[in-house]
Image (cartoon, grey):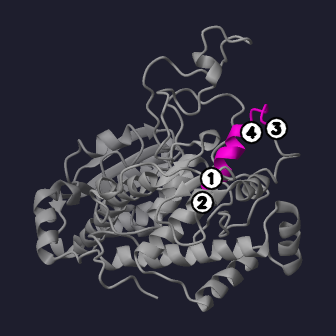
Amino acid sequence: MSPDPRKTPPRGGSSANPSAKWPSRLSGAQRTGLIASALVLAGLFVGFAIAQGIGQPSVPSDSIAVVKDAPAGLSPITKEQFAHAFKQQASSLPKPPKPSSPQYDDVKKAAIDNLLDTVWIQGEASDLGIEPTDREVQTQLKTIKGGFGSEAAYQKFIKQSGYTPEDVRTVAKLRVLGSAIEAAITKGVPPVTKSDIQDFYNGAQEQFQLPATRDVRLVLNRDRAKVEQAKTALEADSSTASWNKIAKQYSTDPASKDNGGLRPGLTEGLVEEPLNSKIFAATQGTISGLVKTPLGWYVFEVEKENPATTQPLKDVQSQIRSQLQSQAQTQARNDFVEDYLSKWKSRTFCASDFLVERCDNFKPSGHPQNAPAACYEADPKKGIPAACPAPVLQLVPALPGTISLLAPQGERLPQRPRPLGLPPPTSGGLPGAIPGGLPPGVGAPTP
């Protein structure tokens, strides 16, 4: 299976990972990042919105959305499909939330996102001339089922979650499509040249500087009297043979006592104070001490001073090549995210009761998406909610450790103190996944 040869992939990309985890339920930002990062060809859709036909298609009364130029059978998205997706999203809750429930809007949006993801991925693959084989889908389906541990566990999930075998097959198909498109991105990344590596090395040599170091011989012991005896002996004879004998007899430092007290290549700040300062102020070849530290008493000698050096290009060229390749892949992925979302949003039109930001006819209120509506009411019946954001533009950075290939935007939270009782970000999969859904490696879109 390969993309249409008439299509030329852009520069940049990243390796596909068919076994990457695909949680069953994600936040809107995570889901958008997950789908966007699995697709291809940054720059392909520049000016696409301009090229679209004028006018907004009407959404049939039995549907929630229309996606222009979607493959046959995928648009419009019906209310029946929405009800099915809503049931799946609510399967981990004690019961499906009612419209008056605070959880209702979150579950509703997650269901709509799932439905749009399914259409957008398959539509993108169709545009690129990518079609999975039945064998590829079956292999992926086997991997998904294997994530449950047993056939009984898989059947239990099917019974309890609202998913059907066809739903899971669609998930398998989407994963195959994502891997194929991702492979096209990787293929489009130009190789890093020797000239690229040389230019980077010349312009960033400070990254490859090694600090000055000192080779030091020392004796450590908590008993001051023993260290004084060692110092007296070393002042009489500081030869290597004497150090070997004295260190073994008096030192308790496990890293050097059997090596003549030698600690080679010490950089400033590596050992505890005040020993660190004393070592880097001492004269080479002089027995120095006594120095008291939390670990005990020291006597030492600076045997050799090693000046700062710069690593030669031959020792770091592999590191530079990997860094430049990764940067190219990241840039291509970032470019694609913007173009892909713009393209498919311009094709998507939703019914008034099902408008989300991914619909072209969505009109934003200017309020933060996660802010309660009562925050902006003149006289809210229950008072102003405690969760109202500050009346200034908030930064919403990604939490450290939550950015990955499948979620390039990571988990984003307003920049404010972490509320008491908020559980820490999840590990082993993307943050935000609702417990009780598909196992690792199983996606959630609904056909």
Q: Residue at x 22, y 56 (%)?
A: 207
The mark total stands at: 4
Q: Is residue 90 above or below residue 278?
A: below
Residue 189 on image: x %, y %: 28, 74
For label 3, the residue is 98
Q: Is residue 235 visible?
A: no
Q: Residue at x 42, y 24 (%)?
A: 393
**In-front residue for pair 27/213:** 27
Q: Secondary structure at mark 3?
A: loop
Q: Secondary structure at mark 2?
A: loop
Marks 1 and 4, how far apart at CA: 24 Å
**In-front residue for pair 198/126:** 126
For the residues labelled 2 and 1, say whether their Cβ atoms are less than 8 Å apart.
Answer: yes
**Left or right side of 67 for 218:** left
- Res 104 label: 4
For label 1, the residue is 60
Marks 3 and 1, how far apart at CA: 24 Å
Task: Choose mark 2 or mark 3, whichever is in front.
Answer: 2
For the residues labelled 3 and 4, say whether their Cβ atoms are less than 8 Å apart.
Answer: yes
- Tell me which label, 3 or 1, sits earlier in the chain: 1
Marks 2 and 1, how far apart at CA: 8 Å
Residue 333 on image: x %, y %: 37, 62
Residue 113 on image: x %, y %: 60, 53
Q: Is residue 100 magenta?
A: yes
Q: Amino acid at mark 2?
A: Pro
For the residues labelled 1 and 4, say whether their Cβ atoms are less than 8 Å apart.
Answer: no
- Tell me which label, 2 or 1, sits earlier in the chain: 1
Q: Which residues are magenta?
A: 99-113
- Res 76 label: 2
- Tell me which label, 2 or 4, sits earlier in the chain: 2
